[in-house]
Amino acid sequence: MADNSASSGRLKYEAGFAREVYGMENGSYLKLCMQCGVCAVSCATFKIMDYSPRRLFALVRAGRKEEVMKSNTFWMCTTCLMCKARCPRGIPIVDVMHDLKGLALKQGYVNYPQAAFYQAFWQDLAGRGRIFEGGVTARYFLKRGPKDFGKIMAQKDVGLKMLSHGRLPLRPPKAVKGKKELMQMVAKARELEQKGAN
Ligand code: SF4
Ligand code: SF4
């Protein structure tokens, strides 16, 4: 599917979108992109992305918000860092992908399962500083709703095997030491993020 789902029908241009992306923590690096395509040929998941990183960045510049935000590209990024290591302009592509994920979540572009997983993982982690696999799984499927019931059933044998090997705890772990300080750090990070957004 790489680079070939450029859209059909009317194209919508949103003048402020490129500025919005440039305003993100790593977004301004995109101004350096010279569209060489090294990131695309270096990317292991390029073939299952709607757009290669190179193409995605061109769409950002062109103000094509809906195509960027609805694409699976940043959700398919495995953060392998290959593109970042090879980009001749030194663009931290993987960090831009993280920023785009954050923007998508904030603005409600959450149709991909990865979006639900990111939210479930973070909500579980932020509560105690440690992950409870059962909690993440439950949150994930609650977010995805009945449409993923078949997937739950398909995974049941894996879950049972993990249980029998003691790899799937039934009770949540204790919170980390210094949970209060952790919460303060999270609150501070959110405050800074909010300030950056204004
Ligand atoms: S490798 Fe870097 S400069 Fe080349 S297209 Fe990708 S992001 Fe742009
Ligand atoms: S970090 Fe993401 S975009 Fe870059 S090569 Fe790896 S999977 Fe592809």
Image: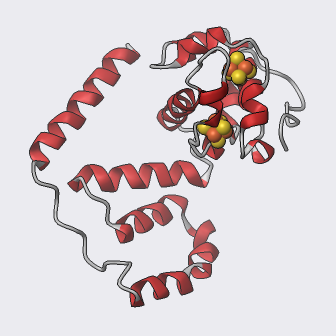
Q: Is residue 141 above or below residue 59?
A: below
Q: Quadrant of the N terminus?
A: top right
Q: Nearer the viewer, residue 68 or 131?
A: 131
| Residue 173 in which image quadrant | bottom left
How far across and down, in percent of the image, does residue 183 sit? 17, 42
Residue 149 is situated, as x and y percent measured from the top left of the image, at 59, 74
Vertical relation: 3 (above or below) 141: above
Q: Is residue 1 left or right of residue 31?
A: right
Which residue does the image show at 51% across and 34% down from the upper left? Answer: 98
> Where in the figure is residue 109, as x and y percent of width and height?
58, 39
- Tell me if 108 is positioned left or right of 39 in this view: left
Q: Quadrant of residue 61?
A: top right
Image point 70% across, 37% down: which residue? 71
Res 156 quadrant in image: bottom right
Residue at 57% x, 44% y is 110
Ligand 1: image quarter: top right
Q: How is the image coloured?
A: secondary structure
Q: Give the left or right position of residue 154, taking residue 103 as reference.
A: right
